[in-house]
Amino acid sequence: MKGLKFAPVVVACGLFFASPVLASGAQVEKVAEDPGAYAEVVALLEREAASQLTRHLQQTGELRQVSVSIRIDMKNRSMMVSFGPGYLPGPEGSYDELFLIPMASSLRFYAEKSGLDVNDIDFLFDGKTLEEYYPEDLAVPPQVQVRSTQTSALVSASHGYISLHPGREWEFQRPAPLGVQEDTLSPAYGDELQGLIEQRSGLTVHRARSRSTELHPESGKPWEHMSSRYHLKALFPERTDMWNEFPNSPASAREKDEDIRARPNYANHLGVDVMLSLHTNGSESASVRGTEVYYHQEKPQDKPLADSILCAMQEIIRAQPGYQDFPIRESSSAARHGENRIGTMPSIIVETAYHSNPDDVAALQDPVFRAASMKGVEKGYRLWAAGKTCEPLALHPIPDVDVLVQSSRDVGLGYTGNPQYPLAVELSLTSCSEAGACTPTTTTFDDPVKPLAITLACNGPGSGVVRLTAVLRDADGVATAPVEFAQACVRG
């Protein structure tokens, strides 16, 4: 593990923590049940967290050691990371969420590689949550009632340029360790999602950042590369409460903190029904990868939306060739992003993939992955808004069918799931009693209102049996498992 200052240690479960590998089922069980193995893994996680914190403090010019302890609740799949005295992030710096949330991702990754199943991670600071230190600032605003018919959404795609004080240098907010700049990549994902929501969900879509290629007059950078803060400043110069919350802050990167708050402030101003934030993730470890979706810890009512989006992303991404095994979390994660907290409407964050992992970087630059991932976001939202459950696409069993010679017969098909029309039913041959007499077919269905039925024909003069395999495939490439049945051509 990056940052650990000792030789590789073999924990009791047999894992090398310095180079994590997937734990076997027996290893997972042993770590969960063996107090010694559990304690060893937790101790290693504590050292990693302490090492990350020390580096973070050094980067901010603070030289001190802060104790770290970790407790894992295996029943609830949660982890509590407790920092001792000496570290308390504050409002100027957005409570270090751009440090703490990536730390949580890496700790989750290493815990799971060692056999400890973890989903939600939270932090204590000298025994208290941040909300206890800043009750007014971190209070979740009253939530609007979810409307039965939704009409509008805000798509917020990543960060963008900010100005550093006092020199007024312009810098992107996110690192690009492997050459992919989140600040300029994510807006293309926003374009994809906007088009899908407008077409498939029928909503009006607002954007938190400008997509203009003209130059921002103050920086000389393209408007499309600027953060939301400057876009909203141009739209609402008098609304400094929206985009300029820390005018007297001495922090160099105070406009980064203002930008985080500007996006949900804009969503509240618009009164949209949902806020969908798109990002790529980053980690100190190049091994951490995959798709994650976050909701705010104090807004559990947003979790169903987050889970629906994650489920639909998994379905559509893994339906694409080459992405069948792309890592996608099974459940959304609770965190404390300001971008989710401030919005008075359901608000979630999609971390599409990791810009710090080479395999994820390749995916992020692939138009196929971009389209599939955003189709998943839109579909997950649409199912949630309609009160539907995201479930796998599956064909019902098809009974064997007798068809009279030189006639045809319609056979109705049933399925579970929520496919995107048009659909195709693909019939392939498993066996045919007369060589060359049987033909595979594909039937397309455009109308979701009409029942699904295929026509089976026996056009030849003789009897026989063909065994067929049916697959239902939707417009997004999602396909059912094959269902086999027999068609017999019989004489009357």
Image (cartoon, helix red, strand yellow):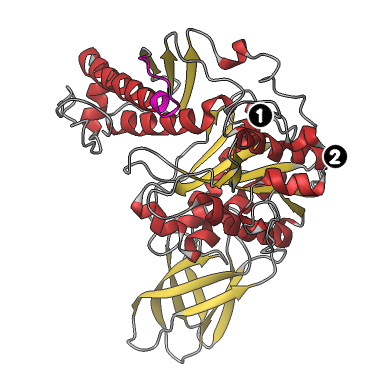
Mark toward the start of the polypeptide (2 vs 1): 2
Q: Residue at x 53, y 70 (%)?
A: 425
> Which element type, helix, strand or loop, lies under badge 2?
loop
Q: Amino acid at mark 2?
A: Glu
The reply, left or right, for residue 127 in relation to residue 177 is right
- Relative to the observer, which residue lies in front, 477 or 127? 127
Q: For the point 40% across and 52% down, which residue is it?
A: 360
**Is residue 182 in view from this perspective?**
yes
Task: State which quadrant residue 436 falls in.
Answer: bottom left
- Find out whether residue 179 is within the magenta segment: no
**Where does the image place residue 435, in percent across and percent down from the top left?**
32, 87
Percent coordinates x, y for residue 325 in the rendering? 37, 53
- State the residue in front, 240 or 467: 240
Is 115 on the left-hand or right-hand side of 218?
A: left
- Which residue range is magenta in the image? 56-65
**Location of mark 2 (residue):** 238
Secondary structure type for disc 1: helix
Is 327 positioned to the left or the right of 375 in the image?
A: left
**Badge number at residue 341:** 1
Q: Is residue 416 visible?
A: no
Q: Looking at the image, which is closer to me, 22 or 474? A: 22
Query: Residue 41 at x, y = what percent?
Result: 26, 21
Report which quarter residue 285 is drawn in.
top left
Q: Residue at x 24, y 13 (%)?
A: 35
Q: Residue furthest right?
A: 238
Cα distance between the residues tagged 2 and 1: 24 Å
In the image as oriented, which residue stretches furthest toward the bottom? 461
- Badge 1 amino acid: Arg
